[in-house]
Image: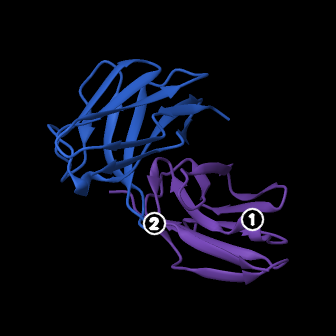
Chain colours: A purple, B blue
Amino acid sequence: QKEVEQNSGPLSVPEGAIASLNCTYSDRGSQSFFWYRQYSGKSPELIMSIYSNGDKEDGRFTAQLNKASQYVSLLIRDSQPSDSATYLCAVDLSFGAGTTVTVRA
Amino acid sequence: GAVVSQHPSRVICKSGTSVKIECRSLDFQATTMFWYRQFPKKSLMLMATSNEGSKATYEQGVEKDKFLINHASLTLSTLTVTSAHPEDSSFYICSAITSSGFTDTQYFGPGTRLTVL
């Protein structure tokens, strides 16, 4: 059973700050790592994918992968109220429970 | 990214009736689709894996005779909630897999909100 664990939320950050989301996984052979954003009442939306160790940046989002530590993170820079959502970590096709982020104006 | 549609987006039905939800991959072929259910403020719960041309694989605790899944083509999977009851009221979301080299990426449909009166 592949397990994906996310840090428990909710996470509250002030507008303009960095939101840091963490995720660990159990299967060392995992190949693909994803972050999804889910707004309340909506379905998940893919925002980042990462496959190799290191950082991957896309706009205000940075995904970081460390396969040796079985750890993947998502940083949201200059957080905006519109970033308030639940963020789901997925490893291959297994999902974490999600971390809810609230950005305070 | 790949586009997945669901129909209907919202449905209200009477207890005891059956409801069919369609999931389509619009710009790609999907051998595998998934069906999830999500209750308010709860995590996604995988119900079943739908494979084109074969029987669906259901997660433990999901009644296959109540939640009928048909994946008759590479772009369409359907979920039928049979003899729906108020406790079946939920947000049903499908997803489809695109494959690229060594990796599979999952894209979600917009979801169907089912209310059973």
Q: Chain of mark 1?
A: A
Badge 2: residue crowd in 10 Å (few <14, some 14–19, many ≥20)? many
What is the crowding at mark 1: few (fewer than 14 residues within 10 Å), some, or many (at least 20)? few
Measure how far apart labels 2 and 1 are at the Cα level: 21 Å
Q: Earlier in the sequence, mark 2 or mark 1?
A: 1
- In the image, residue A81 above or below residue A28: below
Residue B69 in the figure: left or right of residue B11 = left
Q: Is residue B93 above or below residue A57?
A: above
Left or right: where A97 falls relative to B27: left
Residue A96 screen position, x and y as percent: 47, 63
Q: As shown in the figure, which amino acid type bears the numbered disc 2?
A: Ala
Residue at 46% across / 47% down in the picture? A93
Q: Position of residue B73 (x, y in %)?
A: 40, 16
Of tags 2 and 1, the one toward the viewer is: 1
Element type where label 1 sits in the image: helix
In the rendered structure, the residue with mark 2 lies on which chain? A
Q: Quadrant of residue A23?
A: bottom right
Residue drawn 52% across and 39% down?
A: B109
Residue to which mark 2 is pinned: A97
**Image x and y of residue B29, in percent:** 52, 20
Picture residue at 44% right of the left edge, 53% below the top: A94
Q: Is residue A72 visible?
A: no
How many numbered badges does the structure rendering display? 2
Mark 2 secondary-structure assignment: loop
Q: Which quadrant does the C terminus of chain A fall into?
A: bottom right
The quarter of the rendered structure image containing the N terminus of chain A is bottom left
Residue pointed to by mark 1: A82
Residue A32's disc is: none
Report if residue A96 is visible in the image: yes
Q: Position of residue B30 (x, y in %)?
A: 48, 25
The amino acid type of the residue labelled 1 equals Ser
The residue lying toward the viewer, choosing from B61 and B105, is B61
